[in-house]
Amino acid sequence: MELRRQVWDKLADEWNVFSQDELIYETDLDGLGNYIDLMLTKKSRGRVVVKMD
């Protein structure tokens, strides 16, 4: 069990290769089409948050 905890701690800290800023994108409805195009061509990464302001 201790080994599992050590591995999870490393994954969360020193082995973490991506920050959330690199994987979460924000857009409005006008820019959503660009992200959909990326998704359809399998060139997207992460998540897209659509702001509804």
Image (spheres, rainbow, N blue to C red):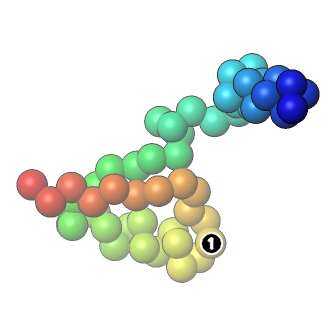
Q: Residue furthest front?
A: 1
Q: So how many labels did they put on this image?
A: 1
The image quarter in which residue 13 lies: top right
Residue at left offset 38%, top offset 67%? 34
* Residue at image mark 1: 42
Query: With respect to residue 40, does 19 lie above or below?
Result: above
- Amino acid at pointer 1: Lys
Residue at left offset 51%, top offset 69%? 38
The image quarter in which residue 7 lies: top right
Picture coordinates of residue 6 (x, y %)? 82, 24
Q: Residue furthest left?
A: 53
Neighbourhood count class around disc 1 (C-alpha, 10 Å): few under 14, some 14–19, many 20 upward:
few
Residue at left offset 47%, top offset 56%? 47
Residue 7 makes an appearance in the image: no
Q: SS class of the residue under badge 1? A: loop
Identify which residue, 7 or 51, lies in the foreground. Answer: 7
Picture coordinates of residue 40 (x, y %)? 54, 79
In the picture, the quarter occupied by the C terminus is: bottom left
